């Protein structure tokens, strides 16, 4: 059985997985429209509706965030999510119209051994992207607990030496606030020290959440070797992530939190933020309170963001399940 993690925030998260396609979608739906921001540190991102997250943009809050496989084809998942949200009466009000605001980021998983014949092409005669339906299904599946490993956007993704997946981790802030990191890890680099079982994020692990192996001693001879996917191509690699909190944030503060969370990717993946990575972090404030947060509260969240994100990245790989045709082994196949 896949592991799962509860979500102690006013936030529902849902997966939709197509095992034949070997791809999927993950959606984040705050109970109420939420302040959000984005920071991109990789050189090859694939995104939608992200300019409006800039601090100077007019729209203050979003209705959902979508992470999807399928490279640019996966951006159609946001259309499915918009349809579902519109039916729920969600969206930015413009007169009598409502337009759901759904930023999205995608991963390249087109060469992972799955059957991609369902992806539209004129030659195949397909007229509708499977990602539209996966976006709808992810919304319908959203709840307060989410599966980890090979599910949703984490279904068919890889790192340089091991299968990737979807991971999450939580941390408590002062005054009863919560911080959560979610990551779909398709990194160009490795999340382990060398080619062994030890995770680079080991110093931040809590309660054996990714095996309790700690740090290797001595470090393997290739610990500092920048091993990457040898056949890297534009958009073929990416870690896409969400850092969410119930701390009230202004958009500029959410941007700072997203920037801090990128340090967690760099702590857990080596190398990270490469020209062929599309590393992208969304920050999401689910608080109904009026922001902005005080500087000390923001500082605490930014201090906790890197370690929490690093844990989520490691757990994504630790929880990944093997499947037929995988181009690289799952961590559990090699080391469990």
Image: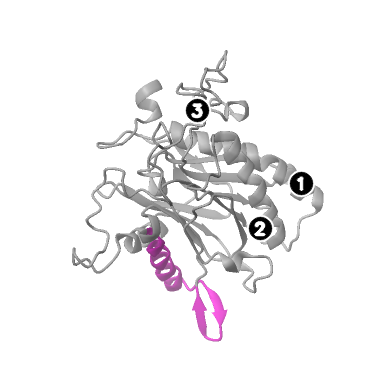
Residue 15 position within the rendered picture, expressed as x and y whole percent measured from the top left: 40, 51
User: Which label sits in the foreground, 2 or 1?
Assistant: 1
What residue did someone put label 1 on? 299
User: Which label sits in the foreground, 3 or 2?
Assistant: 3
Q: Earlier in the sequence, mark 1 or mark 3?
A: 3
What residue did someone put label 2 on? 287
Q: Residues within 10 Å of mark 3 (few under 14, many from 20)?
A: many
Q: Is residue 9 left or right of residue 87?
A: right
Does the magenta-highlighted stretch encompass residue 77?
yes
Is residue 49 depicted above or below 95 in this figure?
above
Residue 118 position within the rendered picture, expressed as x and y whole percent measured from the top left: 24, 58
Q: Quadrant of the N terminus?
A: top left
What residue did someone put label 3 on? 192
Mark 2, secondary structure of its residue: loop
Disc 2 and disc 1: Cα gap in Å? 17 Å
Q: Earlier in the sequence, mark 3 or mark 2?
A: 3
Residue numbers of the magenta segment: 74-99
Residue located at (48% from left, 36% from top): 189
Does the magenta-highlighted stretch encompass residue 141?
no
- Taking the view exactly as shown, the residue that stands out farthest to the top is 218
């Amino acid at each position: 059985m896949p592991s799962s993690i509860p979500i102690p925030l006013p936030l529902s998260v849902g997966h939709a997985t197509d095992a034949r396609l070997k791809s999927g979608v993950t959606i984040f739906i705050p109970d109420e429209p939420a302040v959000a921001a984005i920071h991109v540190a990789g050189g090859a991102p694939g995104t939608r509706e992200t300019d409006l997250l800039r601090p100077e943009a007019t729209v203050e809050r979003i209705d959902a965030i979508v992470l999807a496989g399928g490279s640019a084809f996966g951006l159609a998942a946001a259309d499915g999510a918009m349809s579902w949200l519109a039916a729920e009466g969600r969206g930015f009000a413009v007169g009598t119209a409502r337009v759901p605001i759904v930023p999205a980021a995608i991963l390249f998983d087109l060469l992972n051994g799955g059957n991609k014949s369902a992806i539209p092409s004129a030659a195949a005669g397909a007229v509708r992207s499977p990602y539209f339906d996966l976006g709808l299904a992810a919304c319908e599946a959203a709840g307060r607990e989410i599966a980890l490993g090979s599910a949703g956007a984490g279904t068919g993704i890889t790192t340089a030496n091991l299968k990737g997946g979807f991971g999450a981790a939580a941390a408590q802030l002062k005054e009863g606030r919560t911080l959560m990191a979610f990551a779909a890890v398709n990194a160009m680099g490795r999340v382990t020290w060398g080619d062994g079982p030890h995770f680079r994020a080991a110093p931040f692990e809590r309660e054996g959440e990714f095996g309790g192996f700690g740090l290797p001693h001595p470090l393997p001879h290739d610990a500092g070797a920048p091993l990457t996917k040898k056949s890297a191509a534009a958009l073929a690699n990416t870690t896409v992530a969400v850092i969410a909190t119930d701390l009230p944030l202004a958009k500029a503060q959410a941007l700072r939190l997203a920037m801090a969370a990128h340090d967690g990717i760099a702590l857990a993946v080596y190398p990270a933020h490469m020209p062929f990575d599309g590393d992208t972090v969304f920050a999401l404030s689910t608080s109904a309170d009026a922001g902005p947060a005080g500087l000390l509260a923001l500082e605490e969240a930014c201090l906790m963001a890197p370690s929490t994100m690093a844990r989520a990245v490691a757990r994504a790989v630790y929880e990944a399940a093997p499947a037929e045709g995988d181009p690289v082994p799952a961590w559990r196949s090699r080391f469990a």
